[in-house]
Image (tube, rainbow, N blue to C red):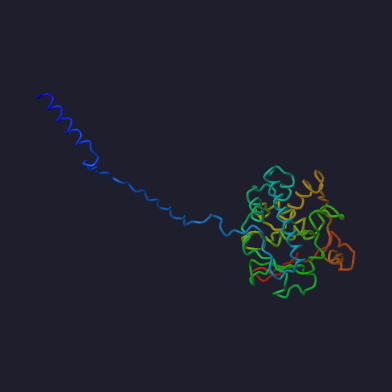
């Protein structure tokens, strides 16, 4: 009987311990809280950059359309000039002709600034805030100390400039043609006057074609930042590589006096079909230098 009674007692004890009603369980509850990450306070490194040259509200729809296309051609001309140098370096005969034995970095840099530099504030306008468009023969001007980042395009430019598509046409040669006969090369010159592009370093060290060629051989350090040299090189490289591949239209320089050039200048009217001479002076680009000297091309 004793073993039976002990077994019953043990069975009863285990039943009490196993009863859920009599066992108090302690459980730990974990709560997870998701905290949103703080938004980054920094902005893109190039925030605010402007990729197209601004055109002032003074330009009407027609002027704006022409300027937009002309500025596009200017970028195209500068882009190819840069690519020509990157491809051929100073082994290019065209490069040697205009820059002598100078290193390639500086001219590449100037063309690159025209193409990819920040264009904020580099404004082209069509009104006449300084009154210069009233002067005979003025096609536009850099505003200089009045507004160093602004360029005025006068009405005369719209009837005298030609598209880059016509390069090497109409009897034009690089050696004897006016550098501002085409919109692209004219605006390239104007852009180099703007401090944000030319930095005050691109200047007029030589002007006429023969002077530019001589500068390359005598002062190549100046040639790489001579405004007219950069224009001539860009035109000849584009003519040889793109306009008339493998041939171009370099031409052979013929000496002419300023009096002869002036007498050949012809400006067509809105009702005239007369074509301006490619060897004559096109509508002027004029500006005043810091020393007060007025320069027109």
From the top left corner, tell me how far across and down residue 126 is, in percent: 73, 69
Q: Is residue 58 above or below residue 192?
A: below
Q: 68 or 111, which is in the foreground?
A: 68
From the top left corner, tell me how far across and down residue 182 is, in percent: 78, 58
Based on the displayed image, in which of its 4 quarters is residue 14 positioned?
A: top left
Q: 204 or 122, which is in the foreground?
A: 122
Q: 220 or 69, which is in the foreground?
A: 69
State the residue at coordinates (64%, 57%).
51
From the top left corner, tell me how far across and down residue 148 is, in percent: 63, 67
State the residue at coordinates (76%, 49%).
238
* Left or right: 269 as drawn, with respect to 120: right
State the residue at coordinates (77%, 74%).
135
From the top left corner, tell me how far across and down residue 196 is, in percent: 62, 61
Q: Quadrant of the C terminus?
A: bottom right
Q: How many marks?
A: 0
Q: 129 or 195, which is in the foreground?
A: 129
Give the residue furthest to the front: 1
Q: Quadrant of the N terminus?
A: top left
State the residue at coordinates (88%, 62%).
275
Q: Is residue 11 above or below residue 221?
A: above
Q: Is residue 45 above or below residue 15?
A: below
């Amino acid at each position: 009987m004793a073993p039976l009674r002990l077994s019953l007692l043990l069975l009863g004890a285990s039943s009490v311990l196993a009863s859920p009603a009599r066992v108090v369980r302690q459980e730990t509850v974990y709560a997870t809280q998701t905290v949103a990450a703080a938004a980054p306070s920094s902005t893109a490194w190039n925030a605010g950059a402007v990729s197209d040259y601004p055109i002032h509200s003074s330009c009407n729809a027609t002027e704006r359309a022409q300027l937009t296309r002309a500025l596009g051609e200017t970028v195209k001309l500068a882009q190819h000039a840069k690519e020509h140098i990157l491809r051929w370096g100073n082994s290019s005969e065209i490069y040697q002709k205009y820059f002598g034995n100078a290193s390639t970095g500086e001219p590449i840099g100037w063309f690159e600034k025209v193409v990819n530099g920040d264009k904020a504030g580099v404004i082209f306008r069509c009104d006449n805030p300084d009154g210069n468009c009233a002067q005979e023969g003025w096609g536009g001007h850099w505003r200089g100390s009045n507004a160093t980042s602004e360029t005025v395009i006068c009405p005369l430019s719209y009837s005298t400039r030609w598209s880059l598509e016509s390069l090497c046409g109409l009897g034009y040669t690089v050696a004897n043609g006016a550098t501002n006969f085409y919109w692209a090369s004219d605006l390239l010159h104007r852009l180099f006057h703007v401090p944000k592009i030319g930095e005050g370093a691109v200047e007029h060290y030589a002007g006429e074609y023969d002077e530019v060629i001589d500068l390359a051989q005598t002062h190549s350090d100046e040639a790489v930042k001579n405004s007219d040299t950069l224009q001539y090189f860009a035109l000849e490289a584009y003519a040889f590589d793109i306009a008339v591949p493998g041939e171009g239209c370099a031409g052979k320089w013929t000496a002419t006096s300023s009096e002869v050039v002036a007498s050949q200048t012809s400006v067509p009217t809105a009702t005239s079909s007369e074509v301006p001479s490619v060897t004559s002076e096109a509508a002027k680009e004029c500006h005043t230098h810091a020393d007060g000297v007025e320069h027109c091309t």
